Image: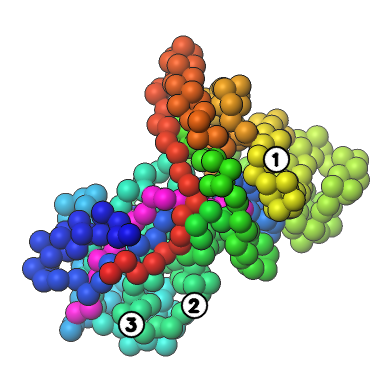
Amino acid sequence: MIHELVAKTQAGFSDLFGYEATGVWSAPGRVNLIGEHTDYNEGYVFPFAINRRTFAALALREDSTVRVASSFSDDIHQVDIANISSDAKNEWAAYPFGVAWAIQQLAEVSPSGFDCFIESDVPVGAGLSSSAAIECAVALGLNELWGAGLDRRKLARAGQLGENEIVGAPTGIMDQSASLLGEIDHGVFLDCRSLEATPIELGFSSADLELLIIDTKVAHRLVDGGYAARRAACETGATEMGVTSLRDLSIEDLEKAKEILDEVTFRRVRHVVTENQRVLDTIRTLREAGPTAIGQLMHASHESMRDDFEISVDELDTAVETAIRHGAIGARMTGGGFGGAAIALTPIGKISEVTLSILAEFEALGYAKPDIFAVSAAPGAIREV
Ligand code: ADP
Ligand code: MG
């Protein structure tokens, strides 16, 4: 079934550029089911691609000009394919430009210019990685049109490289891996040390479960240095424990960690070590007992982020506890913390009760109105037409 936004993307392209696009490629946003603040400790994450997608209509040009436009904004950004750099004037176009630049670094191509028009229904800035969606849609399309021959794992790397070097965001490879390697009703188990990515069946659809996203609208306060401080504590913990990264510690090592680390660093370390174990336990539990059995692990992940890593906020705690009280199987904050979204694994029959309860609770407490919607695990990037 062709997505309704495909025709809109084609029309957007031809209205703007005056000719038909060669094709339309799409890629999904993602949500992280479990495994938070484990990526930069070379640990495990378990995201899945969601049924919200970004579409890129593309056509190669005879010359070396690149033009990109999006339904999100009125301006057309233009650059010469040989002159892509990390210029602040790129604004949002840094994402498609970055990918075009990164593919040239990773593949033997003699790239021509191209025109690109973007449509999307991935919410921006809700922690669902609208950035990876745009990168991966453009990456898959350019890979094909340029004959670059990169496989999906290399294309994920291209998305990351473009985001690091041209956008200037020091992010990992989780988002792009989920967006490119996702499958219907599967999560992508990613080992952030080996970068090995394995699709794992979730079984949500046969169990009539969906994942509610509760976007609290509380702005990420990463600027306060909370995120940097957590990364620093993890590095200190690893150094003092004599390991390259916290990935090398297991639950048994926590006893020793408690003796030699200061109290705060110990709790930061305990979050990462137990969270890695929870990702592995989630994979095993899904296989052995099915998705209704992973609720405890999700909640333990939330408590660990709230109490040990100290990155939750009242709105996230309220969303999690209210969801569970009203029938969610499990819930946790997701993403970097200090705001952003919570997720709640919820039986379809309970979705409206959970949603209405959270809305009522937030209103009673005087919090801003959250945005609440359900997602399911969808296929990764594809060529649509
Ligand atoms: P997230 O990835 O969590 O949604 P980011 O800050 O990483 O948040 O990326 C959001 C940015 O990606 C937007 O500010 C914009 O620059 C760009 N972006 C995402 N989707 C689109 C789109 N459809 N059109 C134009 N730019 C987009
Ligand atoms: Mg992003």
Q: Earlier in the sequence, mark 1 or mark 2?
A: 2
Q: From the viewer's perspective, is 170 left or right of 307?
A: left
User: In terms of secondary structure, what is the magenta stretch mainly?
Assistant: strand
Viewer-proximal residue among 99 and 8: 8
- Cβ of mark 3 under 8 Å from ligand 1: the answer is no
Question: Which amino acid type is marked by label 2?
Answer: Asp
Tell me the crowding category of disc 2: few under 14, some 14 to 19, or many 20 or more residues within 10 angstroms, Cα based: few
Q: Residue 139, position in %: x, y?
A: 38, 70
Residues rendered magenta in the picture: 46-61
Residue under the image location 46 percent in, 12 percent down:
364
Q: How many marks?
A: 3
Which of the marked residues, 3 or 1, is nearer the chain's N terminus? 3
Q: Is residue 77 visible?
A: no
Give the position of the N terminus as an image quadrant: bottom left
Which residue occupies the foreground of this view, 249 or 32?
32
- Assess whether mark 3 and mark 2 are in contact (beta carbons under 8 angstroms): no
CA–CA distance in space, label 1 to label 2: 35 Å
Q: Please indicate, yes or no, whether residue 187 appears anywhere in the rendered image.
A: yes
- Residue at position x 29%, y 63% from top? 56
Q: Which residue is mark 3?
A: 146
Q: Residues within 10 Å of mark 3 (few under 14, many from 20)?
A: some
- Residue at 58 percent across and 59 percent down: it is 188
Q: Say how the picture is coloured.
A: rainbow
Rounded to the nearest whole Å, what is the CA distance between mark 3 and mark 1?
46 Å
Q: Which residue is mark 1?
A: 293
- Which quarter of the rendering shows the C terminus? bottom left
